[in-house]
Amino acid sequence: MQKEVKRRKIEVVVLSDIHLGTYGCRAKALESYLKSIQPKTLILNGDIVDMWQFSKRYWPKSHMKVVRRIFTFLSRKTEVIYIPGNHDELVRKFSGTTIGRLSIKNKAVLELDSERVWIFHGDAFDVTMQHSRWLVKLGAIGYDTLILINTALNALLQMMGKSRISFSGKIKASVKKAVSFINSFEETVARIAVDQGFDTVICGHIHQPADKVFSFGGKEVRYLNSGDWIENLTALEYNKGEWSLYQHPSEDETSHDEDPIPDKSELFFLLQKELKESAAFSRKESFSTHM
């Protein structure tokens, strides 16, 4: 008899900067987290698959398991909103597309308990992204190499019973320009959100989880950043009128054979079913509207 998995029910979950297809992606830890939750709405806020560095030579089973778990949510009545980032910007061509409970948007606006929430990836506010894309892509390759070295070192440290370290985290904290960029990014995003009349603004992009309140001209706005699944292993969760920043245990790299996910044929069947249900619902709505 298959063991029943107990999942936390969450109203909204925001994930960003997973970077599937790169060595730095902590897919096993993410799969562990996805297995533990059942969200009503899942928002994938950019850089989910790293198309800049994607290679057919590197696509581990753990990365495919993450994709399948996301599609499994659709079969469990979860609404999935995909907001592309700069590393998966090719998906922006399909913005406005809806397939069943899956929709692709450049941004999302939520009304939650009288709170207006603005969600987008954030690369539009990155000056370097706008004017030196080649430099950013070169930096991404260097960052992935650094993470690969860091991963090997951390494996050695764990074997020795010592704590993990983060090279890029130490670099960000020690380089004044990096700290200045993060502060400038957060303030710019928050200021624009206030001007647009939002209570809360949520971004990804800079891999820096945050929960801050900014004030401009007597108006306050809450700035949230969902972090990433390379170093921080963080997500944003909304339940009972409150946002919280979740951090997954860094040592949790377990797989979950006791809770099997669909294989390719089952996944195709689930998607077919989703499309049929969506089409049937649309016809029903159209019929009732013209009655």
Image (cartoon, rainbow, N blue to C red):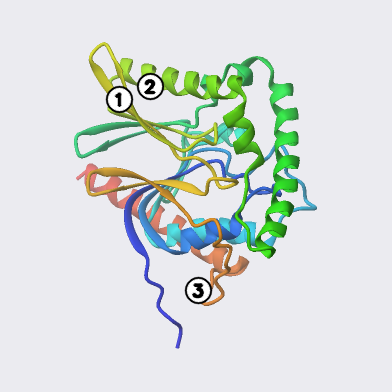
Q: Is residue 90 visible?
A: no
State left or right for residue 287 relative to residue 184.
left
Among numbered discs 2 and 1, the one appearing first in the sequence: 2
Q: Residue 29 has which mark?
A: none
Residue beneath the point at 44% across and 47% down: 235
Residue beneath the point at 56% across and 47% down: 229
Residue at the disc numbered 3: 259
Which percent across, then down, holds residue 191? Answer: 37, 17
Outermost residue on the right side: it is 57
Outermost residue on the bottom side: it is 1
Residue at the disc numbered 2: 190
Depth check: give the residue in front, 89 or 95: 89
Q: Is residue 11 visible?
A: yes
Tell me the kind of residue under disc 1. Answer: Val
Depth check: give the residue in front, 229 or 10: 229
Tell me the kind of residue under disc 3. Answer: Asp
Q: Is residue 89 above or below residue 74?
A: above
Residue 68 figure quarter: bottom right
Considering the numbered disc 3 on the image, is that residue within a helix, a strand or a loop? loop
Label 2 – label 1 distance at C-alpha:
6 Å
Determine whether label 2 and label 1 are within 8 Å by CB.
yes
Residue at the disc numbered 1: 221
Tell me the kind of residue under disc 2. Answer: Ala
Considering the numbered disc 1 on the image, is that residue within a helix, a strand or a loop? strand
Depth check: give the residue in front, 254 or 256: 254
